[in-house]
Structure formats: structure tokens, C-alpha cells
Amino acid sequence: MKQQIIESIIQQMLQHLDNVQLQRLKSVLEHELFDCEIKTQTKSDEDDGNQLIDSFITAKRIEGCSEKTLKYYRTTIENMAEAVGKSVRHIQTEDLRTYLTNYKQKNSPSRVTIDNIRRILSSFFSWLEDEDYIIKSPVRRIHKVKTATNVKETYTDEDLEKMRDNCVELRDLAIIDMLASTGMRIGEMVLLNKADIDFNERECVVFGKGDKERVVYFDARTKIHLQNYINSRTDENPALFVTLRSPFERIKIGGIETRLRKMGKELEIEKVHPHKFRRTLATMAIDKGMPIEQLQQLLGHKRIDTTLQYAMVKQSNVKQAHRKYIG
């Protein structure tokens, strides 16, 4: 406990003293505290830590984070606190470095996963600092984890046509066109109702992450396939997409994922899943010259960096642009 107090004092004086002065201060503290007996109330620290985590989650909920995100935040922070074995007020940079190192060795996660953990912990300890629960976030000196930039696959025009031609059900054809032409998230699509669709303007309002509304647009082919599907239905369910059999319930994300995965195997198309349609639309939009700010709004991204990760510009287009603007 003495060493923790000394390290805490040193951390607080980092911005005020140089290295020689800090070393001298540490020596003085170790000498003066050598014969001192320090008592702590571990139980109250643990209770305080749990309360601080609860308060942080509440703050994030007010900011508009989804319950799924909040659960991920809580689990990540609680797992760290349990592994470190200290009250969150006393956790230091070296504790977190050790935790991340051990986590990496034990679970063999990707660099993206490690950086996600670092990012969540940074958000938590920065909040503690802003709320004056701690003097300085211990994550400040833990830098962003470098991750490799992988060019993720998109569907080719041939892939999309093969999927359309393979559809036996009008519903499946409408689903593929809706995903391909709007770029909406699968979670947004399953929440749509028939009344949400404006066929005249070929648009609809979806609820994205954090319950934020935005307008998405679909093409003429999607309009025709949607109308054919809706007109073929005999049920009274207000949902836009429902199961094929009675009682015709609103279709779930898992149902669409399973359907697409099966189709991919039959057509020998690799990695057929809903999110790949979104990435395909983003890449196609960039290749055709859509401004990145407009694509950001279309996809419902809060940060433009996220949009850039989706949009993989083809090298051939870079070559043409170089010849046009520079060569």
C-alpha cells in the first residue's frame, strides 16, 4: 500500500518536476514512510469502484449509447478491474499494460480487439478524471494499438446478379435489393414497417445506432421488387419483412443471416452476409465520385474515420485520378 501511495504522488507530480527531482521525491517518500503503518478499507474501495462503473454507464446511456454497447463497456471494465485486483481509483498505467499483455497472451485476440479494450478503458478513466475522481487517467501513456489495414471484400456486380437470379421468394429478392441499394444496417432493416416506405420519393426513415433517425434511399428496381413482395402478402403484420410461414412474424436478424449464408454456399460466393452489402455500396459510391461527407450521412456514421474504413477505393481509380489531376 505504501508503494501505491508513493506511485500515486509521483504520478501527480509528473508535470511539475523533472526526472531528477521526481527521483529525489521518491527517495524522500520511501524514507519517511518506511516505519509508517497504513491501514485501508478495502471493502469500501470495492464498493466505490462498482459505484463509479455504474455512474459511468449511466453517463454513457444519457449520451445515447445503445444497451448492447453499454453491456460491452461494463463487461470490459469489470473484467479489467477483477483481473487487476485494485480499486479503480488506485489503478496505474503499469497495471493496465500488464493486464493487456496478459489478455493478449491468454486469448490471442486481434489487434483491433486489444485496441477496442484500450479505447473503452481510456473513455472510462478519462471520465473519472473529468469528474475529479482521479487526478490523471492511467491510460494517457498507453498509445493506440497499430492495426493492419485489410482491404475487406465486397460483392461484385456478378455476385449480386447471381443472388438475385437465385431468389425463389419475392421477399428474399426484396431483401437483397434493399440492402444493396440503401446500405442500411441489417438491424435497421428488420425494424422497418410497411408504413415507413415512401414509394413516391423512393426513401424511408430508419433508426440507427443511438436511436438516431436518418433517411435512406433505394433505386427503381428495389421499388418494384418491394411492391411486388408487399402485394403478394396476405398477412396483416405491419412489419416490412416477415417470415415465410404462419403466423408471419417480423423476421429477425438471425433469419436473414442464415438465409444469405445458405445462398452463398449454393452459389459458391464467399462470405455472404448482410454487412457486406453496406461495404459494397460505400465502395461503389466512392468509386463513382460521391463526396465522403455525403456518404457519411447516408451510412449514418458519427465520425468520418469510420466511413473511410468502409470505402475501399480501387487502385485503378487512383491511377486515373492521378493522370487527370497531376499527370
Image (tube, rainbow, N blue to C red):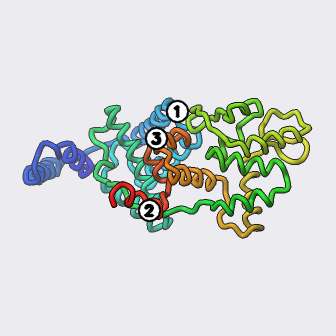
User: Is residue 227 placed above or below 285 in the rendered structure?
Assistant: above
Mark 2 residue type: Thr
Q: Residue 200 falls in which quadrant of the image?
A: top right
Query: Of discs 1 and 2, which sits in the foreground?
Result: 2
Q: Residue 250 falls in which quadrant of the image?
A: top right
Residue 240: percent from left, percent from top? 77, 38
Q: Residues within 10 Å of mark 3 (few under 14, many from 20)?
A: few
- Between discs 3 and 2, the one toward the N terminus: 2
Residue at position x 49%, y 49% in the image: 289
In the rendering, which numbered label is found on residue 293?
Answer: 3
In the rendering, which numbered label is found on residue 149?
Answer: 2
- Gap in Å between the C-alphas at discs 1 and 3? 22 Å
SS class of the residue under badge 2? loop
- Gap in Å between the C-alphas at discs 3 and 2? 21 Å
SS class of the residue under badge 1? loop
Mark 3 residue type: Glu
Residue 182: percent from left, percent from top? 64, 44
Residue at position x 41%, y 47% in the image: 121
User: Is residue 269 placed above or below 145 in the rendered structure?
Assistant: below
Circles 1 and 3, Cβ within 8 Å, touching? The answer is: no
Judge left or right: residue 158 versus residue 153: right
- Between discs 1 and 3, the one toward the N terminus: 1
In the rendering, which numbered label is found on residue 9?
Answer: none
- Between discs 1 and 2, the one toward the N terminus: 1
Q: Residue 167 falls in which quadrant of the image?
A: bottom right
Mark 1 residue type: Gly
In the rendering, which numbered label is found on residue 64?
Answer: 1
Residue 23: percent from left, percent from top? 11, 54
Residue 265: percent from left, percent from top? 74, 67
Residue in front for this viewpoint, 135 or 43: 135
Judge left or right: residue 110 versus residue 260: left
Specify whether residue 110 is in view.
no
